[in-house]
Amino acid sequence: MSLKHGLLGLLSYQPMTGYELDKEFKRSLVYFWYAKGSQIYTELDNMEQKGWLTSERIVQEEKPNKRVYTITNEGKTEFMNWLSSPDVDINNAMNIKSAFVMRVFFAGENSTAQTLELLRSFRDVCLARNVAINEVKGDIAQEKSTYTPKQAICWEMTASYGEMMNRARIAWAEEAIVKLESMN
């Protein structure tokens, strides 16, 4: 997957501003794809140049002006071609690229206290993410009627994926903490 296809997918639901896309991305796709807000805006400009979306600048008196992005037929074709492409590398779904995990790998060079602090911080971030995941699950339940039944189920499946991955991270961190604490 690429960021552009995620954005095209979100725009296939409805037109949105860059701010709304960033917010929706962080509410839904963040559990399996990460992007900074600046990356989103850069990609939107690139996709508009390719003709995959259009934008309309809306002048507002009480608020800053905004641009509303709408997917074009060319954008829908690109999205559907990507979505139905048989070239999905399932093995890449298992790949992890994490500077955090690399730090843990080499943490034998740090003090035990430093490594425990690192692991506890990671666990706390994961615990906080559980709150966000539960909010997303609540949003999905509330907004189910906005989407087709299949769209809602697919969104539920990806939220479940994020929830299970997060539970595994918490369990791993707690196990690692116990192992390090037992060394003392």
Image (cartoon, rainbow, N blue to C red):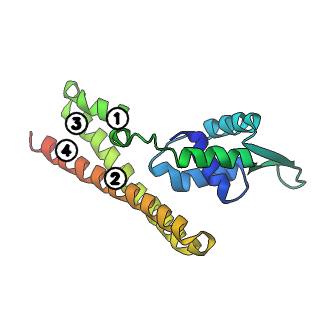
On the image, the x and y values in percent for residue 54 come to: 79, 45
- Between marks 3 and 1 in the image, the one whose residue lies nearer the viewer: 1
Identity, as a three-letter code, of the amino acid under mark 2: Met
Identity, as a three-letter code, of the amino acid under mark 1: Phe
On the image, the x and y values in percent for residue 83 come to: 54, 48
Instruction: Note whether 177 is above or below 138 in the view shown.
Output: above
Crowd rating for badge 2 (residues with CA inside 10 Å; few <14, some 14–19, many 20+): some
Identity, as a three-letter code, of the amino acid under mark 4: Ala
The residue at the point 44 percent across, 58 percent down is 158
- In contact (CB < 8 Å): disc 1 and disc 2: no
Give the residue at the far front of this rendering.
86
Crowd rating for badge 4 (residues with CA inside 10 Å; few <14, some 14–19, many 20+): some
- Between marks 1 and 2 in the image, the one whose residue lies nearer the viewer: 2
Instruction: Note whether 136 is above or below 54 in the view shown.
Output: below
At numbered mark 1, what does the secondary structure look like: helix, strand or loop? helix
The residue at the point 34 percent across, 45 percent down is 122
Identity, as a three-letter code, of the amino acid under mark 3: Ala
Q: Which of marks 4 and 3 precedes in the sequence? A: 3
At numbered mark 2, what does the secondary structure look like: helix, strand or loop? helix
Residue corresponding to mark 3: 113
On the image, the x and y values in percent for residue 81 come to: 58, 45
On the image, the x and y values in percent for residue 9 come to: 61, 51
Crowd rating for badge 3 (residues with CA inside 10 Å; few <14, some 14–19, many 20+): few
Residue corresponding to mark 1: 100
At numbered mark 4, what does the secondary structure look like: helix, strand or loop? helix
In screen coordinates, is 10 left or right of 171? right
Q: Which of marks 1 and 4 precedes in the sequence? A: 1
Measure how far apart labels 3 and 4 are at the Cα level.
13 Å
Name the image quarter holding residue 48: top right
Crowd rating for badge 1 (residues with CA inside 10 Å; few <14, some 14–19, many 20+): few
Residue corresponding to mark 2: 165
